[in-house]
Image (cartoon, rainbow, N blue to C red):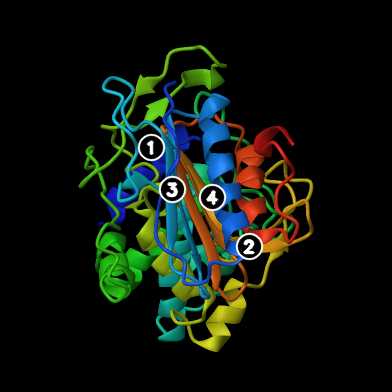
Amino acid sequence: MFHARAGLLAVALTMAGAAMTAPASASGRDRDRGGDHDRIRAGIRRALDRIVAGDGGPGVVAEFRDARSAPWSGTAGVADLATGRERRTDEHFRIGSLTKAFTGTVVLQLVSEGKLTLDDTVATWLPGVVEEHLGADGTGITVRRLLNHTSGLPDAIPGQETPRPEEPGRRFIYSKVNYSLAGMIVELVTGTTLAEEIEHRLARPLHLTGTYLPGAEETVRGPHARHYSRPDGSGPGSDAHDVTEMDVSWAGAAGGMVSTTSDLHRFLNALLGGRLLPPAQQREMFTTVSTAGSGWVPDTAYGLGLYSQRLPCGVTLWGGGGFVPGSVSYAMGDRQGGRVLVANLNGDWNDFQETFTALFEAPFCPAGPPPGGLDG
């Protein structure tokens, strides 16, 4: 298993990387029929419609949950460009970097059980691996630095030479390699696969029936939208390629999972609410480092698998986003998990930050989004 995972790390260094519309539909019934909930639902509906109308992707699905009301879900656009089939709220999709929150949670559970520490070094668990593949010194890279992206290890960019490693602890560098290594450590500590650890520690206890790490499995199980990609950042009007059947094992612990909006709600609500980690590890997960100056997502600070992001209205959310070819996802909520929004687009060419802001202003900003949604 160790040698196989080391081989996958080498593959990741070279492979990893980064319409038709229909009226928005909604399901769910609010117990509270007050104006605040009506405003939130209407704001999310407008954002969904404008995302697909503005060529942000073939289709989008969103689910909003508030502890004070019943769940609400909505869709816009299509799941299949060939048939015009509309998106459904129960679809499965690839969640990309949201996988990191699951991996980070498993690592911290192992820490709470005394099976490793956040101060253990990569050299302790994976002797020679970063030296051989990256020319780095594993004695200065701790498990904590892997999880908060301060290891100094570079990201893997397709078609580009891998940059040289930097000094560990100096600054935030978002890198899938960090979580590939963390997943390898989980497997050495437990003697099982990361997929099995996610299943028995998280998916099964939380009844996440649509959540799994598929490995080299190319299909998406269960009902799902087609996943579409525009290669090389092609602009509006260019052809979208169907990439639904795809081996994403290179993303693995960093971005290889599949889930649903309802499953991501249950997971994030439990994580933010402190039901998955003891207090000491919960504090570690929410201890962040600044991402300023890194060229990553603006207005963010990164913890151990999830991050905080400040909206233009000043509200700070917690959770994460995920990009994988053909699928863009978001799952973020307030610090206690009482109010959470999860969304997925089955196309990868939208403006990530603009779409995020349009979707999350309605439920989280007191005054709501500006008129016009995406264009406001």
Residue ID for mark 3 = 74
Identify which amino acid the numbered label 2 is placed on: Gly
The location of residue 186, given as percent across then percent down, is 37, 67
Residue 88 vs residue 38, the one in the foreground: 38
Asked if residue 298 lies left or right of residue 211, the reply is right
Residue under numbered circle 4: 321
Check contact, mark 3 vs mark 1: CB within 8 A. no
In space, the residues marked 3 and 4 are separated at their CA atoms by 19 Å
Label 1 sits on a secondary structure element that is: helix
Front disc: 3 or 2: 2
Rendered location of residue 19, percent (x, y)? 44, 21
Q: Nearer the viewer, mark 1 or mark 4?
A: 4
Residue placed at 41% from the left, 60% from the top?
264
How many other residues sit within 10 Å of disc 3, few (<14), some (14-19) or many (≥20)? many
Q: Nearer the viewer, mark 2 or mark 1?
A: 2
Earlier-in-chain disc, 3 versus 2? 2
